[in-house]
Each structure stands twice: as C-alpha cells, then as structure tokens.
Image (cartoon, rainbow, N blue to C red):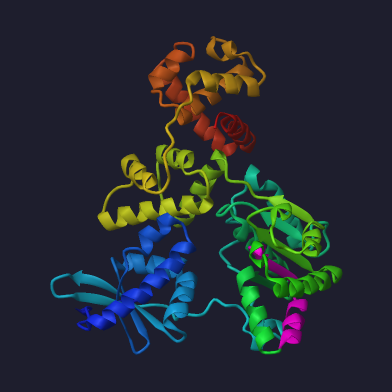
Amino acid sequence: MHSISAKPIFTNNRKMTQNVQQQWAQCQTILADNMTASAYQTWFAPIVPLQFAEGVLVLQVKSQFVAEYIEENYIPLLSAAILRVFGQGTRLEYRVLIDSTSGAGTSLPAQPLETQKAIPVQQMNPVAQNTFEPQLNTLYTFDSFVAGEPNKLARTAGIAISKQPGYTAFNPLFIYGGSGVGKTHLANAIGNQVRALNAQARVLYVSANTFKLQYQDARNANRIPDFLNFYQSVDVLIVDDIQYFAGLKGTQDTFFHIFNYLQQSRKQLILTSDRPPIELKDIEERLLTRFKWGLAAEIARPDYQLRRDILLSKMRRDGIQLSDEIVDYIAQNVRHSVRDLEGILASLLAHSTLTDREIDLQLTEQVVSHIVAIQPRKIRVEDVVNAVAEHYNLPPKAIIAQNRSRDVMLARHVTFYLCKQLTNCSLNEIGFQIGRRTHATVLHSISHMREVLDLDPVLRQHVAQVQATLQ
C-alpha cells in the first residue's frame, strides 16, 4: 500500500449513499456471520461506505493500520462478501479520514478482489499439476497449530496421514468439534504438509457449501461427468463442514460416488464437522457408515494450558508483548474458542494503536468484558489444596505443613500457582491459609512455577489436569 494526495472523500449524492450503505450492510452481515464478534466489532463495524461508482467501492477506515491489517488477515472473506453483493469486477479502495471538516482523506488502494469460489465448473477437468489450485490456506500449518491435550489425537493422526496419505488406518479422518476449536486449521495443515512432502500431490480443500454450489452448477450445465472426473483425480480431498450436506440428496449421492472411488483408490479423505457422525441429521446412512470407516477424532474446547500456549504463540508470531498477569487473565476468562482468543488479541492491539494507550490489565478487562461473560471466581484456597493433594496422592495437610520433601514441595508450588490463577485471594491471604506463609514466599513460588512451566511439558499437563477438575 502507498498513500495518495489528500482529497475530499464525501459524496453529495444522497440516493447513491443510501444504496451503498444498504449494500455494505449486506456485506457486514456476511462478515459478522463468518468471524468472531470481537474481530467484527474491531475491524469492520467502524467502516463507513462512502461511494460505489464505476465499479469502485470506497470504504472509509480509521487508519492505515486498520486497512493494512484487514488486507493481511481478512481479504479472502472481504472479497467474497463484496463480490457477492456488489458484483464481479468490483474494485476496492480505502480512504483514511484526515480532516472531518473538509472531508479530506488519504486514498489507499486495496489488493485486487478475487472470488473465493474454488474451481469453476468449466475448469473441472484433470489438468496438469502446475495449473491445479489446492485452495489451501498456507498460513494454516502444523507449526502454527498449537498442540495440547484437547487436540492431541486429531493432530497425531494428521501428522501420520501427511506422511502417507491414503495408506494409514485413518481414512477417512473425520475431525469434529465446536466452532472455533481449530478443525479447519488442522485440516489445512495436513494438506499443506502433504504438498510440502510431495509437490506432485493433488490436494484440494473445499467447503461443503462450495461443493454443493459446484455440484448444482455442474448439474445445470449438464457437466456432471466433468465434475466427477475432476474430484476423482484428487489425491487428498478435504471437505470442511460436512454437516451442511444435510437434506441435499443429489449432493450426497454424488459425494457418495466420489468417496467410494477415492477410498478404493487409496486416496485420502479428510472431513470436518461440528458434531460426530452419530449425531449428524439428514445424512444418508450409507454415507454415515463410511464416515465411521476410519478415525473420528474430536478437537475439544481448549483447556486453560492450551489457551495460554495459544496466546503465547500468537504473541510471538505478531510481535506482541503482554505481561504474565494479562496472559493469565485472558486464558482464564476466554474459554470457548481459539477464534475468541485471536479476536481478543486483535481487539487489544487495535485499542492500543488507535487510542495510543498501553495494554494493561485494566484495558484487558474492559475488552474481554465486552466479548465474553466474565464468571465470578468462587474457588477457595481449600478447594485448590484438596484438588492438588488428590492429584499427587497426598494428604491435604502435607501441603499446608512444613514438610519439605521433594514431592510435597512440588505440590505446594502448584497449589500456590493455581490459587493465584483461580481464586480472588491476595498473596497474603493465600500464604496465610497455606501454613501461614509470607507474601514473599508465595510470590517466589509462583515466579518459579512460571519459569518451570515454560520448560516442562509434563508439569504443564499436570497443572492443566488439576485446573480442569476445579472448573
């Protein structure tokens, strides 16, 4: 992107402005339905549509930073929304308002908008590898997929598949879990790894909705044989959100034949869904039976330790520095989705950048409270002591007493650490209730635990297990 000389950015055509606003509102509906509420409120809710003339849509954004962030992170989704509402061939331009009185602003050209509908019907022929478009998100790799207990099985199976697609017991691999837990990320990571290991492999990612639309287009154009030939030429087929095949008999019949051909040809199928096969509704029994042939692997909602690891990974990737206190607060309160964690970081960065304010705990609490319902902490020090003692097979009084054996000392460190994370007690209160220890002793123990947790995955797992029993 580069800046162009400032010029007025307001249109005087009231009717045109109203039409653009109505069309942009349709775009916003599409955007809001496909991202977290926090991300939408941060990046797209404040955008003002200025005009649409000669095929150019002009959107007013708050700063060049906002435009660049959207270009880097959301252009595929934004493209799909704009092209659907404003039509193919639409070009996008951003304007940054400089002077609200005069309407002067700076123009920022956007990337060319490209439709995200993969593989038009007329291109559905087995073609040379160098013209085959896998439709994978290259940012979704195993390196950027943070491992943890909730995704361990699915990730391990995915790694095995990427080394020998079609030749493991995991065919098909059926990945299921709630929204935002990382199903699409993992499916793409498998595809990207297959291509990294074998550049000639024909890997294709497609959403269930896109597959449905392609099938309908092929049927209307009397090109079903081309449609089948294309999909049967794929080595690794990834179908995202397979639950959207529900009730679509023609789509299911066609996919049944593709599935059979690929499976019998030792080609790999990877399917994702928001529920396990047994809970899918309005899907033909013969398809459900095949979905169960391989491995159905759940990705559960991230536990505390995985949420914390994800935050640290995103911070390293984006060059963000946050205190341990802030990281712990987010990990403790944003529990349901990886997307929510990403949205929180994006919101914090936007608030900090646009208001020139340091990211502190007060700002973090403010941002988080607007996105998730903060549950009051009701866990007592006594509850933590009992949970840790049970996990380590110790009597609770051993943790409270002056016992300094190695096992007891470790359990006590874990207790101090979790009391700080899960209770509303001050360090003085925690120390007093655990053997009348001082504030300094508790603080030292917590600091020590944070250092060790960064280096010891086994201990991280134990801490996460104890915490899971308390939440």
The reply, left or right, for residue 331 in relation to residue 57 is right
For the C terminus, the image quarter is top right
Q: Decide whether residue 231 is among the magenta residues.
A: yes
Q: Position of residue 220 (x, y in %)?
A: 66, 87
| Residue plotted at (56% across, 31% down) | 467
Q: Which image quadrant for residue 173?
A: bottom right
In the image shown, does 385 or 175 lie closer to the viewer?
Answer: 175
Q: Is residue 199 visible?
A: no
Q: Position of residue 341 (x, y in %)?
A: 47, 50
In the image shown, does 455 or 339 lie closer to the viewer?
Answer: 339
Instruction: Please tell me whether residue 293 is drawn above or below residue 92 in the rendered image.
Output: above
Q: Is residue 467 visible?
A: yes
Question: Bounds of the magenta span?
Answer: 223-242
The reply, left or right, for residue 357 in relation to residue 414 is left
Q: Position of residue 60 (x, y in %)?
A: 29, 72
Q: Which image quadrant for residue 260?
A: bottom right
